[in-house]
Image: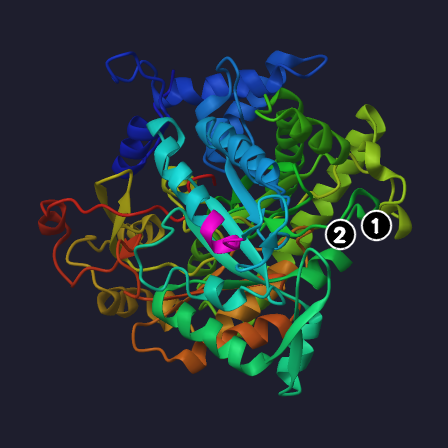
């Protein structure tokens, strides 16, 4: 068996997190065997030519041109393998409803999935509870209980729990929700986002007021100034990175299966709006592997897109769902999320600065191409395997598309640790830095020279030591554009480019330098809405304890590797 070309850090991540282990915790499979395991399992649902498909899936992964989400890598080929990255669970306004959802979430976390919730149906704090003659404690109190449960489960010890909590902007407890993470200690296992409506954004634009409404009755409670609520959101996000925004009305206008219900929440990183109980599995093409001699390899990208769509569709049938209702809803819509990683690497290899007009053009060409090829692949699968059962009355039927196998085919996820395995920049993010610490895996600190930078240095005969952003720019020229040098507007415009060709949504963090102002945050949030994004997240450098990526001072890499380990959360433990 040929040994894979993997970085030292990729092997650390695989050993610590992905490889099968014995009872003593020692690995009992190699990285090569891991990919064979996954490929065989995913090909097992094929009706014919299983061995051929297993070889094709294996080659796609071992070449690092495509990787599926973490649960598939962890669990494919295991008994009871839960393979989906993300689930959305409803929370009904009753004690039974709340704790039934908590039980379902615990099962999903234990099996390796992430969860998203809308707390918007829960009655506000202080409301009368007629059955007990008491008063309700409100959504944030139950959010804290969900967080503690996640902390307890710890996803079997293999992964940190990943959750999204959403509360509508018109919920009476919205101000408490906005502030619930500002102390940087509370609710560490959740990302939070405000569910923004068109009514709110219109009031904000007109410098007016809007109504807060009791979710149990729909009755108006009081009017508030939209600008004051928006400023509170912006200030909290500037301080700690939360909350983000999710544009609920826009999401539901583009709901591919409106007859199946509304979508009121997303997965933990915001790129996958889902119906109640629905799940989705994700995978990403590594765009850095589709460049040769300054040209994009379109034919290879087309072939691999077709294979990746088939891979992800197979995962739906192979998956063992921890919650029975999730299986029913998922099989009715068969959503998959094919996205990309390594976009910034591709730009660097093409000598295009991230944020330059040419970078937006490149993003448009690439994602529109993948969207077109993925949708054609889904139509071809539908002709052989049947369309997704909820096809009748779907958005795609109304728009005149041929029957599709999958209600969604494209999503841009943040890619988390799979980008370390692939040796790629994450998602569509700019490269964070040429050399940095990555805090992962409950105490492991990895020191990384970004692979594309190292490759280009070696191609120029320059030793990749003593690297700083200044040195990289000296060698690579203006194409070197690390994340914090990219203007706010360029971050958001790039997200909007990819959103135009994503059925679901786009996970993109607007990375701001530490000296950025709250006005910069507000500008990003307003621009995201005006450009058609489905949500937006910002992060100001060094604003959060336990930051995932940290840029070191310029120093030889050998010295950095001897530094003591830090601990901190991962950005996307499901992707």
The segment highlighted magenta reads 136-142
The local secondary structure at tag 1 comes to helix
Q: State the residue position of label 1.
A: 395
Identify the image quadrant of residue 174: bottom right
Spot occupied by residue 282 in the image (x, y as percentages of width and height):
57, 39
18 up-or-down from 395: above or below: above
Q: Is residue 481 visible from the viewing direction of this image? A: no
- Image quadrant of residue 7? top left
Residue 104 placement: quadrant: top right
**Count of marks, rendered view:** 2
Taking depth in this image into account, of 531 and 561 the one nearest to the observer is 531
The residue that label 2 is drawn on is: 255
Residue 137 covered by magenta stretch: yes
| Residue in the image at 71% along x and 63% along y | 250
- 348 lies left or right of 39: left
Front residue of 136 and 138: 136
Residue 323 is situated, as x and y percent measured from the top left of the image, at 61, 26
Q: Residues within 10 Å of mark 2 (few under 14, many from 20)?
A: many
Quadrant of the drawing holding the N terminus: top left
Work out how far the residue at label 1 is from the one at label 2, CA to CA, in angstroms. Answer: 7 Å
Using the image as rendered, state which of residue 563 and residue 243 is in the foreground.
243
Q: Determine whether label 1 and label 2 are within 8 Å by CB.
A: yes
């Amino acid at each position: 068996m040929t040994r894979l070309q993997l970085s030292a850090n990729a092997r650390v991540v695989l050993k610590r997190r992905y490889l099968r282990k014995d009872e003593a915790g020692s690995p009992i499979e190699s990285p090569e065997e891991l990919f064979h395991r996954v490929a065989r399992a995913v090909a097992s649902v094929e009706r014919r030519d299983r061995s051929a498909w297993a070889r094709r899936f294996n080659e796609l992964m071992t070449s690092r041109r495509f990787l599926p989400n973490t649960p598939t890598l962890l669990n494919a080929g295991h008994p009871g393998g839960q393979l989906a990255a993300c689930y959305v669970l409803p929370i009904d306004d009753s004690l039974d409803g709340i704790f039934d959802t908590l039980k379902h979430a615990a099962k999903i976390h234990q099996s390796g999935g992430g969860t998203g919730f809308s707390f918007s149906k829960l009655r506000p704090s202080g409301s009368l509870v007629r059955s007990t003659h008491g008063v309700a404690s409100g959504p944030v109190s139950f959010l804290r209980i969900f967080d503690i449960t996640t902390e307890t489960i710890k996803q079997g010890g293999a992964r940190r729990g990943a959750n999204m909590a959403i509360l509508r902007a018109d919920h009476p407890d919205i101000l408490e929700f906005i502030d619930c993470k500002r102390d940087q200690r509370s609710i560490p296992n959740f990302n939070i986002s405000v569910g923004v409506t068109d009514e709110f954004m219109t009031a904000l634009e007109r410098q007016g007021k809007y109504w807060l409404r009791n979710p149990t009755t729909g009755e108006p409670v009081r009017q508030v100034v939209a600008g004051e609520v928006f400023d509170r959101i912006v200030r909290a996000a500037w301080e700690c990175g939360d909350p983000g925004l999710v544009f609920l009305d826009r999401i539901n206008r583009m709901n591919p299966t409106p007859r199946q219900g509304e979508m009121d929440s997303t997965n933990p990183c915001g790129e996958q709006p889902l119906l109640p109980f629905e799940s989705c599995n994700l995978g990403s093409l590594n765009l850095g592997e589709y460049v040769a001699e300054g040209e994009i390899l379109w034919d290879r990208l087309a072939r691999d897109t077709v294979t990746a769509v088939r891979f992800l569709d197979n995962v739906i049938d192979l998956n063992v769902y921890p919650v029975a209702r999730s299986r029913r809803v998922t099989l009715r819509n068969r959503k998959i999320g094919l996205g990309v990683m390594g976009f910034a690497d591709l730009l660097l290899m093409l000598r295009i600065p991230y944020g330059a007009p040419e970078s937006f053009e490149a993003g448009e060409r690439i994602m529109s191409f993948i969207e077109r090829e993925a949708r054609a692949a889904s139509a071809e699968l539908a002709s052989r395997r049947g369309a997704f059962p909820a096809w009748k009355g779907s958005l795609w039927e109304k728009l005149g598309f041929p029957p599709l196998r999958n209600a969604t085919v494209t999503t841009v996820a943040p890619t988390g640790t799979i980008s370390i395995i692939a040796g790629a920049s994450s998602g569509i993010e700019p490269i964070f830095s040429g050399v940095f610490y990555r805090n992962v895996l409950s105490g492991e600190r990895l020191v990384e020279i970004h692979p594309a930078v190292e490759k280009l240095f070696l191609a120029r005969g320059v030793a990749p030591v003593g690297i700083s952003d200044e040195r990289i720019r000296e060698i690579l020229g203006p194409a070197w554009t690390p994340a914090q040098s990219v203007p706010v507007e360029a971050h958001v415009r790039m997200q909007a480019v990819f959103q135009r060709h994503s059925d679901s949504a786009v996970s993109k963090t607007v990375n701001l330098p530490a000296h950025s102002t709250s006005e910069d945050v507000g500008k990003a949030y307003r621009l995201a809405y005006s450009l058609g994004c489905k949500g937006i997240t910002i992060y100001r450098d060094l604003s959060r304890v336990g930051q995932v990526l940290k840029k070191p001072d310029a120093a030889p890499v050998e010295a950095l590797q001897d530094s003591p380990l830090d601990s901190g959360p991962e950005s996307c433990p499901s992707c």
